C-alpha cells in the first residue's frame, strides 16, 4: 500500500524582517516592542488582510506570509514599505523601524498550519539581499507580475549566489516610486503652508561640567545650569531651548555645528563649575554657532553666597551680546526673592534634578530634600512651589496613599507660595493645572496667563497653554502653542504628543491626531482609547477595532462614561465628539 507523501502546492511566499532589531532592543527594549506592535496593529496586519495573505508564523521581529496571488504579495509589500517610510519621516534616524522584504513564487510543503521547503528558503534569502526599506523578488515573481502593477518597477540585479541554495537565483529589486497622486497632493499641501521661521535670537545652554572631582556635586552643577536656563527664559525676546533637551548631551563630547543644527539655534553657552568648601568658580563662554567663534567668556570666582549675583551677571552678559543687542529688560522681569540660606538652596537644586527623573524613589528623595529646605528657611517661596510640583507628580502617577489629601496638600503649598512671592511662574503653572482638574476654567485661564507672562519660554508653560486652549474649545490655537513647545524642547516628554493628538482630534484633524498618538512608544489604555476613537471617525474600522480591543485588554472595566468623566471640556460639543468616536469604535457605554 502506497503511503501518500506530504501535501505540496505552489505559493507566493513573503518573508519580512526588521532591520537592526537587536540594536533597537538594547537601547530601548520596551519602547521598541511597543512601536513594533503599533505598526503591526495599524499597518502590517491590515495590509496583509486586505491583500488576502495568511500569516504563517512570526519570530520576534520577523514574519512569514503566504499569498495565493503573486501580484497581491507585491502590492502588500509595496504598501508596507511606502507607509513605513512616511511613518519614519519625523523620527530620528537612530529610532527608525525599517523592514527588509523578500518574495518568491515556488513549491512549498504544507504541514498543518506551517509551510516549508525550497519556496520558503528562497524567500528568506531574498529578504536578506534587500536594502532597509526595500523589496527583493525572484525571477519567477517578476515574470508572473509583468507590467500589471502601476507604480511598481523592477531592477534586474542579475544572478546571485545565496547561502544554502546550490543554484544561483535571479534577483530583481522593486523600485518603489511614490504614488503620483500622493506626491502631487503632498506638494500642493507643502506649497500652501508657509514656513514659519522664528526671528528671535536663540540659544541652547549646555550642562555645566562638574570639575570638583566629587560625584556628589553633579547635583549642584546641574541645578545651576537649570537656574541659568530659567533666568534666560524670562526674556520675551529670546528663544531658549529647554533643559530636557540640552541635558541629553550631558557628559558627551560635542561639536558646535552638530548641536546647533540639532536645536536650530544661533548660540551655545558652555562652561564648568568647581565648588570647594565655601567657594565656587564658574567659567562660561558664549559661542556663535555659525562661525564656531567664541564671542564672550568670563570666569567668576566667588564666595558661595554670591551665587545669585553670578547668575544675574551671566544672564545679562549673554543677552547683551546677542543679535540686535537685546536689552536686559529688567522692568519686565519678575522680582526674585532668593533665600539667604545656601544649604536650603542646594536642597532645592538637588530636588529639581531628582524630580526630572520621574521615578517613585527619586520623587520620595526630592520630597525629603524640599522638607529640609523648608525647615531651614520656612519662607523660601520657590521651595514651596517645588514642593507642590513634586507632590503633584505623586498625584499624577498615583504614588500617594490618599489622592484627595495629596491634592489638598498641593493646593496649600501653592497658597503659601502665593503669599510669599506672586511672581513665580511655576506656582501659576501648577495652579492652572489644579483648577483645570476642578473644571474651574476661568481660574485655570487666569493662572495660565500669569505663568506665560512670567516665563514665556518655558516648554512646560507653553505646552500647557496649548492644552488649556484645547479644553476651552480653541484647538486650532492649541495646536500652534503645542508645536511651539516642541520647538522649544526638541527632546520633549512624550506626553506632548498626547496633548497634540487631543488638540488635533478636537479640531477634527483625525489623520494628524492618529499620527501624534502613534508617536507614543509606551501607550497606555487612554492612548489606545483616543486612537480607537480617531480611527473610528476616519472610517478605518479595522484599526479602530484593534485599538478598542487593546483598551479592554489593558483596562477591562473601561466605559465611555467613566472615561469622559476624567475629561475637562468646557464646550458640550467637544465632549459629544469625543463620546461619538469612542462609541463608534465599539467601546462599552
Image (cartoon, rainbow, N blue to C red):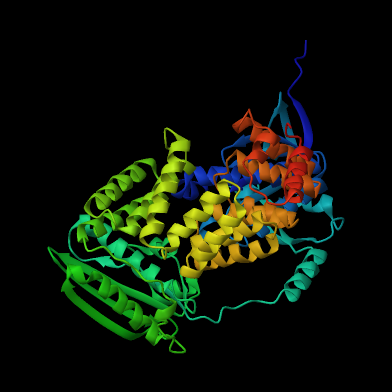
Q: Nearer the viewer, residue 415 or 11?
A: 415
Residue positioned most to the left: 277
x and y, in percent, of residue 502 in the image:
66, 52
* In this rendering, position of residue 36 left or right of residue 152: left
* In this rendering, position of residue 477 left or right of residue 211: right
Q: Nearer the viewer, residue 175 or 345?
A: 345
Rendering quarter of residue 160: bottom right
Q: Which quadrant is home to the N terminus?
A: top right
Q: Residue at x 35, y 70 (%)?
A: 228
- On screen, 45 above or below 253? above
Q: Residue at x 33, y 74 (%)?
A: 270
Q: Nearer the viewer, residue 111 or 549?
A: 549
Rendering quarter of residue 221: bottom left
x and y, in percent, of residue 387 in the image:
36, 50
x and y, in percent, of residue 24 in the image:
49, 50
Q: Which quadrant is home to the C terminus?
A: top right
Residue positioned most to the right: 148
* In this rendering, position of residue 480 left or right of residue 408: right
Residue 554 visible, this orientation? yes
- On screen, 141 above or below 564? below
Amino acid at each position: 500500500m502506497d503511503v501518500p507523501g506530504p501535501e505540496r502546492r505552489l505559493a507566493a511566499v513573503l518573508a519580512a524582517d526588521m532591520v537592526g532589531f537587536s540594536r533597537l532592543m538594547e537601547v530601548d527594549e520596551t519602547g521598541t516592542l511597543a512601536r513594533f506592535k503599533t505598526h503591526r496593529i495599524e499597518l502590517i496586519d491590515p495590509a496583509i488582510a486586505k491583500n488576502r495573505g495568511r500569516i504563517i508564523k512570526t519570530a520576534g521581529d520577523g514574519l512569514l506570509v503566504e499569498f495565493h496571488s503573486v501580484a497581491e504579495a507585491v502590492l502588500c509589500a509595496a504598501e508596507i514599505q511606502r507607509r513605513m517610510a512616511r511613518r519614519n519621516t519625523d523620527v530620528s534616524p537612530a529610532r527608525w523601524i525599517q523592514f527588509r522584504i523578500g518574495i518568491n513564487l515556488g513549491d512549498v510543503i504544507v504541514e498543518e498550519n506551517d509551510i516549508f521547503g525550497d519556496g520558503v528558503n528562497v524567500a528568506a534569502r531574498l529578504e536578506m539581499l534587500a536594502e532597509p526599506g526595500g523589496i527583493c523578488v525572484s525571477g519567477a515573481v517578476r515574470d508572473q507580475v509583468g507590467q500589471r502593477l502601476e507604480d511598481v518597477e523592477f531592477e534586474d540585479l542579475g544572478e546571485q549566489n545565496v547561502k544554502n541554495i546550490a543554484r544561483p537565483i535571479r534577483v530583481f529589486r522593486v523600485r518603489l516610486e511614490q504614488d503620483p497622486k500622493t506626491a502631487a497632493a503632498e506638494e500642493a499641501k507643502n506649497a500652501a503652508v508657509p514656513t514659519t521661521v522664528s526671528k528671535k535670537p536663540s540659544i541652547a545652554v549646555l550642562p555645566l561640567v562638574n570639575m570638583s572631582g566629587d560625584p556628589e556635586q553633579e547635583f549642584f552643577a546641574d541645578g545651576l545650569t537649570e537656574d541659568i536656563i530659567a533666568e534666560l527664559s524670562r526674556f520675551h525676546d529670546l528663544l531658549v531651548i529647554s533643559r530636557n533637551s540640552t541635558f541629553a548631551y550631558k557628559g558627551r563630547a560635542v561639536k558646535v555645528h552638530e548641536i546647533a543644527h540639532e536645536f536650530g539655534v544661533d548660540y551655545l553657552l558652555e562652561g564648568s563649575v568647581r565648588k570647594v568648601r565655601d567657594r565656587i568658580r564658574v567659567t562660561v563662554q558664549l559661542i556663535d554657532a555659525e562661525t564656531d567663534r567664541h564671542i564672550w567668556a568670563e570666569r567668576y570666582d566667588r564666595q558661595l553666597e554670591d551665587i545669585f549675583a553670578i547668575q544675574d551677571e551671566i544672564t545679562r552678559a549673554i543677552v547683551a551680546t546677542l543679535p540686535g543687542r537685546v536689552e536686559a529688560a529688567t522692568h519686565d522681569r519678575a522680582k526674585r526673592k532668593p533665600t539667604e540660606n545656601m544649604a536650603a538652596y542646594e536642597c532645592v537644586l538637588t530636588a529639581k534634578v531628582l524630580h526630572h527623573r520621574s521615578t517613585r524613589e527619586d520623587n520620595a528623595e526630592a520630597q525629603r530634600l524640599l522638607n529640609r529646605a523648608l525647615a531651614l528657611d520656612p519662607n523660601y517661596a520657590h521651595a514651596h512651589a517645588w514642593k507642590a510640583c513634586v507632590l503633584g507628580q505623586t498625584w499624577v502617577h498615583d504614588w500617594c496613599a490618599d489622592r484627595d489629601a495629596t491634592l489638598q496638600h498641593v493646593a496649600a503649598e501653592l497658597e503659601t507660595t502665593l503669599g510669599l512671592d506672586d511672581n513665580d511662574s511655576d506656582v501659576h503653572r501648577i495652579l492652572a493645572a489644579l483648577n483645570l482638574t476642578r473644571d474651574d476654567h476661568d481660574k485655570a485661564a487666569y493662572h495660565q496667563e500669569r505663568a506665560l507672562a512670567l516665563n514665556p519660554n518655558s516648554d512646560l508653560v507653553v505646552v500647557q497653554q496649548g492644552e488649556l486652549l484645547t479644553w476651552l474649545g480653541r484647538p486650532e490655537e492649541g495646536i500652534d502653542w503645542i508645536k511651539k513647545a516642541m520647538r522649544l524642547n526638541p527632546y520633549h516628554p512624550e506626553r506632548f504628543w498626547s496633548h497634540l493628538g487631543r488638540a488635533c482630534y478636537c479640531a477634527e484633524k483625525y489623520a494628524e491626531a492618529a499620527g501624534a498618538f502613534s508617536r507614543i512608544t509606551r501607550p497606555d489604555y487612554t492612548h489606545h482609547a483616543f486612537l480607537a476613537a480617531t480611527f473610528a471617525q476616519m472610517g478605518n474600522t479595522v484599526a479602530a477595532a484593534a485599538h478598542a480591543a487593546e483598551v479592554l485588554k489593558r483596562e477591562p472595566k473601561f466605559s465611555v462614561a467613566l472615561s469622559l468623566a476624567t475629561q475637562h471640556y468646557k464646550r458640550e460639543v467637544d465632549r459629544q465628539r469625543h463620546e461619538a468616536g469612542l462609541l463608534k469604535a465599539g467601546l462599552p457605554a
